[in-house]
């Protein structure tokens, strides 16, 4: 539309050029050489055949019909350079007035030379009514006396016409007016002026032409003092209806045809592959343009000195549209600026002026094209014709379809035809905005805003992209740069803010509504294809699904020509969408994620109108988190120096690599840690890797892990507890089993475990393609296996304080936390310090009785150490522990948690201590005590010990009395305070006691010996030999044996 207006005004100025010729009707007398051809006898005498007049009449026959007065009469012909004046007759008067009867002026083009056939594009001016000219001195051209014209009048009709250059009448010129007058430097008429050139028309009423005065020469100089035209102005009823052909911006009469690459999947070298791809023609052919009409309430003025043609006051320009509403421009003033081929010489004519610029001024200027969906508003609109540059300034805005852009200045330059680019250059000043809503159902409104650039440059620029150094020739490319702190937002998609964006775009033929290209002109078939985006920070993202920040962002677009038009499965859609790959593709109300880094790079796959992520690389203080919906730690977090994510184009095939420091920046022992936090598990290592498709995660080198569990390290219930795990040689996780190696250390609040390798089997497999779970409930550790130098330190603590302290060392240990089963390999040992009643110890038969009635028993620390050769087994849930092969145990009271029972040189321990040797030792918690209820003393756990195979039991009953027992089986029930010794078919049980080492001990042998300490009672079954004397207080008969 802008260039259409320019071409319209240019055409109008060409029409107005004829007025200049009319106003210069006295020009033949200006030049010193004047040839006048008249009869030698009188004005009525016909010229001789073949004379000069006859030759000119032959030329005039090209422009007039037979019988015209200029061909049959005796006209006077005056020829000056390229102007021929034909006068029927003239009458000079002594007062300087020259009366003309009939008058013709013929203006030949500059290209005409004498002797050539009369040219068809000569301009013919005819005033059949004659007129008069008033000079300031008597008129006598024969003597060279020509003065200055002071006034003139040409009553009657006046016609200016020309066949112009094109054959036929499509550009023929016809100008009609009447009653032209001149007074001093002004030539004017109050009548109508009508112009037609081809199918174009123009007109108005009350025209004034202002003439420039020629500088006065020396004494005696003759000639007209008219130095040219200063201006021409039509004041009333200005209106134009012009047919100007193809007048789109930058368009010539011929069509533009471009060869551009078809969008396709790039090869290893994307530029070379795209340039070598199949090509398609994108013709920009235009149908003939309908007429353009211009009207104004003010005047039309053509200022030849300032080289400006202008329409003023309520200017309306519109072009009819046969299939819809008309295009229309409304402004207060419309100007057309020219530059001169004469390099600024005085007297330049419209025919040697070239249009330079078109300018529309108003508050606002309104340009509407309903058929194209275009709406333009600004205070100043300028079109530089030679540069093909359009500039809108002062509250400028352009709307097209459902998109609108606003900026203080909007500038567009159409590409020259000789350039391969089909897309022009665009500049936008700041602050400005862009708002667009894609067509079709479900289209989301997208908004962009930017501020003014600090250095005064345009904030937004779309220009030709430079070719990278050393790159092969490729398709035309554009570079979109936004430097004014752009902000992008959209309904339902949040907002993005940064300091600068550079987007490289390739020109390509439009590929239809399902293709990847962004169509910019549906009629011409031109489109742009994104290739690379660079965003400089600080970059901030805030969307319903993802928030984050970065110092910079690079996005590379790879077109997948082979993919279906609709694209592949949604990023993270359906089963297989991990939190990292589903950060922006879940419905509203889904989890929200945060990603921050100093540098980000995205590899994007373009398939149809769909853009999916193929890979993500982040550098510098990387933090990726799944934001918590309730107070507490985030459900998922990844932290490190480097984050690489690949394989996002396929569902459930992502690969994730997290590094604590940039590659090669630090030795392993000094490298920073990467961290992954997921559902109560925190994992730290120099690098962590995840292969979603293979279902495995691994970390090389040393690392740490923290887990929130309801059990302690040994599987005992403890409530929410933080457990820590360290290793030195790496971690492996295959979805079902987690394995760590190298000086493994596990720590809880009250315990620790050390071994060479630890393996944990989960209660059910983790499917990495399902975001770390399959929705079947909480995942827990089912079994823990420890191998190599297993060492354990465990403390039992209740609200009243520490309850026990256990230590163990063995070759291997396995704990099933679901069933409670425990299995370990020896040799090894277990050490325990715990509270127990002194009377309920593993004491000797016949030891001190219970305290007096009414005295409360007092819990005391007791020490137990068990050494074994083969291993251990048992069940934590059932409170059962078994020691196998060559078992040795020592038990007795101690005064401190770190104290142990010491034996003297004779192998004797302190009073109350006992030693045990057997092939198997079983330790049970008394089942009855589990149901004791609230009255039970938490520090008084009752146990049952069972020793099997070659049992030997020894200890000190008091400072003087030592006891010994031999049996095949020995049982001690702490709750019943009862010993049971039993033999087998090969041997009997024996129990002996001595207070004097010099005397033989008192011994009793039997198949089974049962002994109660409170009150003292002995039951012997299958008596063999000997006797065993109880203390005097124990002589009373015991009630029935407890069952």
Image (tube, rainbow, N blue to C red):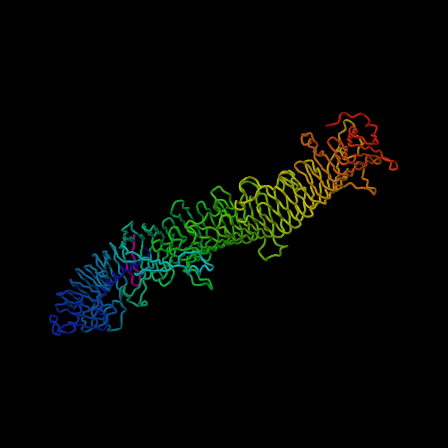
Q: Quadrant of residue 724?
A: top right
Q: Quadrant of residue 880?
A: top right
> Is residue 481 in the magenta section?
no
Where 919 falls versus 74 (above or below)?
above
The single residue placed furthest to the right in the displayed view is 998
Where 646 falls versus 136 (above or below)?
above
Residue 298 versus residue 504: which sits nearer the camera? 504
The majority secondary structure of the magenta stretch comes to strand
Give the extent of the magenta segment: 301-314
User: Taking 994 as reference, is 522 left or right?
Assistant: left
Residue 1037 versus residue 509: which sits nearer the camera? 1037
User: Taking 128 as reference, is 219 left or right?
Assistant: right
Q: Residue at x 63, y 46 (%)?
A: 759
In percent of width and height, residue 257 lies at 34, 60
In percent of width and height, residue 863 lies at 75, 39
Q: Is residue 850 visible?
A: no
Residue 813 versus residue 399: which sits nearer the camera? 813
Where 305 falls versus 817 (above or below)?
below
Q: Is residue 400 visible?
A: yes
User: Taking 634 as reference, is 570 left or right?
Assistant: left
User: Taking 482 as reference, is 817 left or right?
Assistant: right
Where 986 falls versus 418 (above or below)?
above
Residue 903 versus residue 104: which sits nearer the camera? 903
Q: How many marks?
A: 0
In percent of width and height, residue 774 lies at 53, 42
Q: Quadrant of the C terminus?
A: top right
In percent of width and height, residue 831 lies at 73, 41
The single residue placed furthest to the front in the displayed view is 985
Q: Quadrant of the N terminus?
A: bottom left
């Amino acid at each position: 539309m802008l260039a259409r207006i320019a071409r319209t005004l240019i055409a109008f100025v060409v029409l107005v050029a004829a007025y200049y010729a009319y106003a210069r009707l006295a020009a033949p007398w200006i030049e010193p050489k004047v040839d006048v051809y008249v009869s030698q006898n009188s004005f009525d005498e016909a010229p001789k055949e073949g004379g000069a007049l006859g030759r000119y009449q032959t030329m005039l026959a090209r422009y007039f019909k037979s019988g015209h007065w200029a061909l049959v009469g005796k006209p006077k012909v005056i020829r000056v350079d390229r102007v021929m004046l034909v006068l029927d007759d003239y009458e000079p008067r002594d007062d300087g007035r020259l009366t003309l009867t009939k008058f013709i002026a013929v203006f030949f083009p500059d290209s005409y030379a004498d002797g050539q056939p009369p040219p068809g594009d000569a301009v013919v001016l005819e005033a059949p009514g004659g007129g008069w000219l008033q000079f300031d001195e008597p008129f006598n051209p024969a003597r060279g006396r020509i003065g200055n014209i002071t006034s003139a009048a040409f009553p009657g009709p006046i016609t200016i016409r020309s066949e112009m250059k094109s054959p036929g009448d499509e550009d023929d010129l016809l100008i009609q007016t009447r009653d032209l007058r001149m007074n001093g430097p002004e030539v004017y008429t109050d009548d109508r002026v009508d112009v037609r050139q081809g199918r174009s028309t123009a007109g108005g009423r009350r025209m004034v032409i202002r003439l420039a005065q020629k500088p006065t020469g020396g004494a005696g100089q003759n000639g007209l003092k008219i130095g040219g035209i200063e201006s021409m102005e039509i004041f009333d009823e200005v209106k134009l209806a012009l047919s100007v052909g193809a007048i789109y911006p930058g368009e010539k009469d011929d069509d533009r045809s471009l060869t551009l690459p078809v969008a396709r999947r790039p090869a290893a070298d994307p530029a070379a592959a795209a340039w070598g791809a199949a090509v398609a023609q994108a013709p920009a052919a235009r149908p003939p343009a309908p007429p353009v009409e211009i009207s104004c309430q003010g005047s039309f003025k053509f200022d030849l000195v300032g080289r400006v043609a202008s329409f003023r006051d309520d200017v309306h320009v519109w072009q009819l549209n046969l299939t819809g509403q008309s295009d229309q421009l409304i402004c207060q003033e419309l100007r057309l600026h020219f530059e001169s081929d004469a390099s600024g010489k005085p007297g330049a004519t419209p025919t040697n002026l070239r249009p330079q610029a078109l300018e529309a001024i108003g508050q606002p200027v309104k340009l509407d094209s309903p058929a194209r969906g275009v709406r333009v508003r600004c205070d100043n609109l300028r079109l530089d014709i030679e540069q093909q540059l359009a500039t809108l300034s002062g509250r400028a805005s352009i709307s097209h379809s459902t998109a609108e852009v606003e900026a203080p200045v909007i500038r567009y330059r159409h590409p020259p035809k000789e350039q391969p680019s089909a897309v022009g250059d665009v500049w936008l000043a700041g602050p400005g905005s862009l708002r667009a809503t894609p067509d079709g159902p479900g289209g989301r409104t997208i908004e962009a805003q930017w501020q003014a650039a600090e250095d005064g440059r345009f904030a937004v620029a779309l220009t030709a992209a430079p070719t990278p150094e050393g790159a092969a020739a490729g398709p035309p490319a554009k570079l979109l740069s936004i430097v004014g702190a752009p902000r992008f937002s959209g309904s339902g998609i949040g907002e993005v803010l940064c300091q600068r964006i550079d987007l490289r775009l390739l020109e390509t033929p439009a590929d239809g509504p399902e293709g990847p290209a962004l169509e910019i002109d549906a009629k011409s078939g031109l489109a742009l294809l994104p290739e690379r985006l660079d965003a400089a920070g600080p970059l901030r993202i805030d969307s319903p699904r993802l928030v984050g920040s970065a110092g910079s962002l690079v996005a590379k677009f790879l077109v997948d020509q082979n993919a279906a038009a609709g694209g592949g499965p949604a990023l993270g859609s359906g089963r297989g969408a991990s939190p990292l790959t589903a950060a922006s593709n879940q419905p509203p109300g889904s989890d929200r994620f945060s990603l921050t880094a100093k540098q980000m790079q995205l590899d994007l796959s373009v398939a149809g109108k769909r853009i999916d992520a193929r890979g993500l690389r982040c550098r510098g203080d990387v933090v990726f988190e799944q934001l918590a919906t309730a107070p507490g730690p985030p459900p998922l977090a990844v932290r490190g120096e480097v984050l690489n994510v690949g394989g996002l184009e396929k569902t459930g095939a992502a690969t994730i690599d997290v590094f604590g420091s940039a590659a090669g920046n630090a030795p392993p022992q000094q490298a920073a840690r990467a961290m992954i936090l997921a559902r109560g598990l925190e994992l730290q290592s120099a690098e962590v890797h995840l292969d979603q498709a293979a279902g495995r995660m691994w970390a090389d080198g040393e690392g740490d892990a923290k887990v929130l569990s309801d059990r302690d390290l040994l599987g005992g219930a403890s409530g929410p507890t933080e457990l820590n795990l360290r290793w030195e040689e790496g971690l492996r996780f295959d979805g079902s089993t987690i394995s760590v190696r190298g000086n493994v250390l596990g720590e809880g609040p009250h315990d620790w475990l050390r071994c060479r390798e630890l393996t944990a089997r989960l209660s059910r497999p983790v499917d990495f393609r399902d975001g770390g779970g399959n929705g079947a409930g909480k995942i827990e550790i089912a079994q823990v296996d420890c191998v190599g130098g297993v060492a354990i330190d465990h403390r039992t603590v209740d609200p009243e304080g520490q309850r026990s302290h256990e230590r163990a060392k063995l070759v291997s240990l396995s704990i099933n936390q679901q069933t409670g089963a425990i299995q370990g390999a020896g040799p090894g040992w277990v050490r325990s310090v715990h509270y127990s009643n002194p009377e309920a110890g593993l004491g000797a038969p016949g030891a001190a009785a219970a305290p007096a009635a009414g005295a409360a028993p007092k819990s005391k620390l007791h020490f137990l150490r068990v050494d074994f050769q083969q291993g251990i087994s048992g069940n934590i849930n059932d409170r059962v522990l078994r020691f196998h092969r060559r078992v040795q145990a020592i038990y007795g009271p101690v005064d401190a948690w770190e104290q142990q029972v010491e034996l003297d040189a004779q192998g004797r321990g302190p009073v109350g201590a006992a030693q045990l040797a057997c092939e198997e030792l079983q330790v049970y918690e008394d089942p009855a005590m589990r149901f004791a209820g609230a009255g039970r003393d938490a520090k008084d756990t009752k146990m049952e010990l069972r020793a099997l195979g070659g049992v030997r039991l020894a200890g000190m009953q008091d400072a003087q009395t030592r006891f010994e027992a031999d049996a095949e089986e020995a049982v001690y029930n702490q709750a019943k305070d009862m010993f049971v010794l039993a033999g087998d078919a090969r041997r009997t049980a024996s129990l002996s006691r001595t207070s004097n080492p010099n005397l033989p001990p008192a011994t009793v042998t039997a198949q089974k010996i049962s002994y109660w300490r409170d009150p003292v009672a002995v039951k012997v079954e299958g008596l063999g030999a000997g006797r065993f004397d109880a203390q005097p207080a124990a002589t009373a008969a015991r009630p029935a044996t407890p069952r």
